[in-house]
Every structure is written in C-alpha cells, then in structure tokens.
Amino acid sequence: MIPSVSLKPLHWHPYIAPVSVDDATPAQRDAMKITPSNKKVSEYVRTLVHDPESYTARTGLFNAIMYVEGGLDRADRELGALGASIVNGCRYCAVVHARRHVQLADNDAVVSAIYFDRADALGERDAAIYRFARRLSVTPAEATAEDIAPLRAAGMDDREIIDLIHAIAIFGWANRLMHVLGHADLNK
C-alpha cells in the first residue's frame, strides 16, 4: 500500500540543479522538445537533459512504451506503471500513474481498491495486471510462465503481455532514476 492515500499531485525536488531553459545548449533545447507527455518541461526533464543524448534515447523509448497506439490499453499500461511504482516506493510516479489511470478509465474504483489495500476487490483483468506488476517489480529474475498464466486467463494476448512487461520494466528503471536524482513531497 502507498504511504498516503492522497492523489494530490506531488512536487519533485531535484538534488542536481536542473538546466535552465534560457541557458540550455542547442542540443539540450532540441532534446527538451521530446517531452514524455503533453506537460511543460518539468524540473525532472531539465535535470535529465544535462545529458541530451541519453535523455532523447530515454524519452523515445518511454514514449514508445507508454503512449503508442495499439496493443495494451493505455489504462492497463498505467496500472502496470502504478503497481511497479508502489513496489519501488516511488510515491511521485504512483500518484501520477494512479491519476492517469483514473482519467483514462473514467473511473476511480481500481485505484481506490489499490490505495485502500483492497486488491481483492479488483476485477479479474485488473487483479492479474496489478499482481503481475508487483511480482515482476519485486523479483523479475524469478518470473515464470506461471506468472503470465493469469494474464492469459484474463484474456490478454502476447502483444498485450509484452506491452505490459515493457511498462513495468521501464518503471523499474524510471523509479530508481527519479529516487537517485531527487525526492517528492506535497510542498512546492
């Protein structure tokens, strides 16, 4: 369970000074044009863009996993990201992806069940996705075909399962990167 059941947006505070947009190099400015969402260029983006080449590669991969059309439904990708972020202790990402899931699903029942530690109240597909995200985040090297079986039983095909694995895996990395570079809280 997440330490706080609030879905209030958190503010991320970097440990390394973000690149100032006004002082950015041309390569950094070009890299910042490829933000991972439709939001403004955040402090997180401006921190990552110290290395514009790796930021551009990271963002292209992130966008291809989380925002691509087809395959796994976007709300299900967000549920996978939420499960991974909870296990990884990344409150910032957990809140972002919980809010995004609610928005995409146009319903807060799944997120409420998770936040109030009522995973038993989830439907078959949501429960399978959430359990798999948690399992893969805790011990990815121990995942087996048995861990995928509930996803298949819930009606997921190979492409959807691969898409889910990608969403969970990228948050194994993204959560750790965010933790090392800063911290999040309700204060601005």
Image: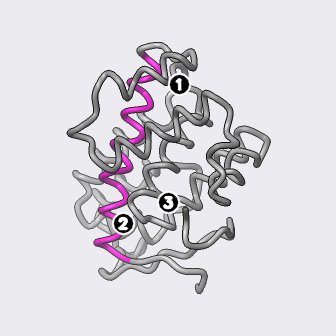
SS under mark 2: helix
Dominant secondary-structure state across the stretch colored magenta:
helix
- Determine the CA span between mark 2 and mark 1: 25 Å
Left or right, 124 with respect to 181, comes to: right
The residue that label 1 is drawn on is 72
Q: Is residue 37 above or below residue 132?
A: below
Q: Which residue does the image show at 42% across and 71% down from the upper left?
A: 21
Residue 36 locus on image (x, y percent)? 47, 49
SS under mark 1: loop
Sequence-first tag of 2 and 1: 1
Q: Which residue does the image show at 57% across and 52% down from the upper left?
A: 97
The residue that label 3 is drawn on is 93
- Highlighted range, magenta: 159-182
Tell me whether circle 1 and circle 3 mark residues in contact (CB < 8 Å). no
Which amino acid type corresponds to the residue marked 3 in the rendered image? Cys
Residue 169's tag is: none
Left or right, 92 with respect to 167, comes to: right
Which amino acid type corresponds to the residue marked 2 in the rendered image? Met
The N terminus is located in which quarter? bottom right
Left or right, 117 with respect to 180, comes to: right
Q: Is residue 105 above or below residue 4?
A: above
Q: Quadrant of residue 43?
A: bottom left
The residue that label 2 is drawn on is 178
Count residues near mark 1 (Cα–Cα under 10 Å), then give few for <14, some for 14-19, many for 20+: many
Q: Is residue 140 magenta?
A: no
Q: Which residue does the image show at 48% across and 38% down from the upper left?
A: 66
- Determine the CA span between mark 1 and mark 3: 20 Å
